[in-house]
Image (spheres, rainbow, N blue to C red):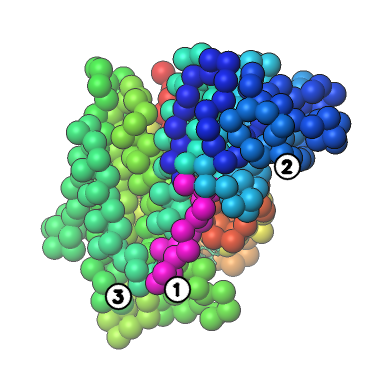
Amino acid sequence: MKLTHKDYSGSCPKAELLICFGVEGKKPSLPGDVALTKAALDDFKGEARQVRFSDATAGSVSRVALVGLGDAKSVDAEGLRRAAGVAASQAESSGAKSAVIYVDESIAKLADGAEAVGCAIAEGLVMGHYRYDLGKSKPEPLKLAKAQTLAAGSAFRQGVKRGTALAEANCFTRDLQNRAGNQLTPTALAAEARGLARRSDRITCKVLDEAAMKKLGMGLLLGVSAGSHEPAKLIHLVYKPKSKSKGKIALVGKGLTFDAGGISLKPSRGMEDMRFDMSGSAAVLGAFHALASIDVGFEVHGIVPSSENLPDGLATKPGDVHVGMNGTTVEVVNTDAEGRLILADALTYTVTKVKPDTIIDLATLTGAVVMALGHEISGMYATTDALRDALSAAGKAVSERVWPLPLLPEFLENMKGGPADLRNITTPEMGGGSIAGAAFLSHFVGETEWAHLDIAGTAWNQKARDYVGGKGGTGVGTRLLIQYLCHRD
Ligand code: BES
Ligand code: MN
Ligand code: ZN
């Protein structure tokens, strides 16, 4: 669906379907020249996500869908995204090929005002109309090809532009996530990253191959990849701001394009979901998709270690010892705790080559975080209160919530004392599997301000949200990162 915007000047452009929003206890207002039957207007109560279709009795459109937002006082960005998401999917099922979405001034004043309302509605429309069809030989095209928001004022227009960029980035992230493991290999992921650099003169991309990683001493990353015939890649994207940079921020994403567990093989039930083990990397690439059209004041680095984790004659065996880029030796007790290994070398690379002010990593790191927090909220570990609070606020604003969990030195201590400097897992009586993963990573960030988001529960199959969720990737992380980058000073 192509979403455009038109400034409202009293009348409605031609379209097969007109969508209008309304709140409880108030007649929805329609563009000047459109009229509806009294029955339709009486039926429509404005309850959240209520949809009432009817024929127009006058004006340039024949069909109208009234969409409810609920109580005007409690409408927020999330309510708008959800209502717009419902509108997009109902418009699609109605068979309409074009739609106009009218937002009158009283609706544009809700939540945080016109720009925020325009942004949320565009996000809901575009994200709500997403469908994954890259796996089909003959995908059935979506019917709704064109949508146009219709509202007054430049703030609303700006909001639509921003919301569209965020939503398209989210859909890009979801497309990466949903691709099959054999279709999205580390090589294919690197090609996607190069494609992002081609979209913008402010973005560049460099890809390190296995020879380059070997030179840098990335034994932990290469140890994970040893059992795979697909070569590992380390992707390094850089975004340079228009004006003088306010600092350097690094986004690091776990890019396991398939995690079978390695020699510590996972059970076969549900193993196909481990194609989503690159969701952290997809979130980072998605953020660069958005950075092609949303300006931020920082130099942003995206670092993605990408590999497969497979059992094979050359695969790392439990008990093998590998040496990381920072010299740390690690006994790989469980080859299924591989995310922390590839991230360890990516974090060392980030700290030593990029030297950022702040690192944020995103990773589908542990099944344990799903036990602890479920599918609604990601686990967050942060070394400073400022970063923790900023990410919490960003998560709330975009409805990709994060919840603070502790960085505990005891867990890192527990990983010491084996034949190498560290084991890659804690002993079973420690429990706290997600905390253990974070503690391991903490060894590789030095003094740099850092946050780790364990997105194993939120990256796919999250509870449906009208505009995102359900089966498949959610694109979690991308909008959160942009929100964070835009609000940091
Ligand atoms: N990719 C998995 C984590 C995961 C599991 C994500 C289920 C989403 C759903 C990760 O590489 C892994 O296998 N972690 C192990 C760690 C353990 C061996 C210490 C886990 O969580 O079981
Ligand atoms: Mn694993
Ligand atoms: Zn994994």
Quadrant of the image containing the C terminus: top left
Can you tell which mark lies on residue 331? none
Q: Earlier in the sequence, mark 1 or mark 3?
A: 3
Residue at mark 2: 53
Q: Residue at x 59, y 61 (%)?
A: 471
Q: Is residue 421 visible?
A: no
Above/below status of 341 relative to 206: below
Q: Position of residue 317 (x, y in %)?
A: 36, 78
Ligand 2 lies under 8 Å from the Cβ of mark 1: yes
- Look at 74% across and 25% down and name the residue there: 28
Marks 1/2 in contact by CB < 8 Å: the verdict is: no
Q: Amino acid at mark 1?
A: Gly
SS class of the residue under badge 2? strand
Pinpoint residue 400: horizontal percent, then vertical percent: 58, 40
Task: Report, in whole angstroms, how far the alpha carbon at label 1 lies from the one at label 3.
Answer: 12 Å
The segment highlighted magenta reads 129-145
Q: Which residue matches tag 1?
A: 261
Q: Position of residue 429 (x, y in %)?
A: 63, 64
Residue 230 to residue 215: above or below: below
Task: Give the foreground label among 3 and 2.
Answer: 2
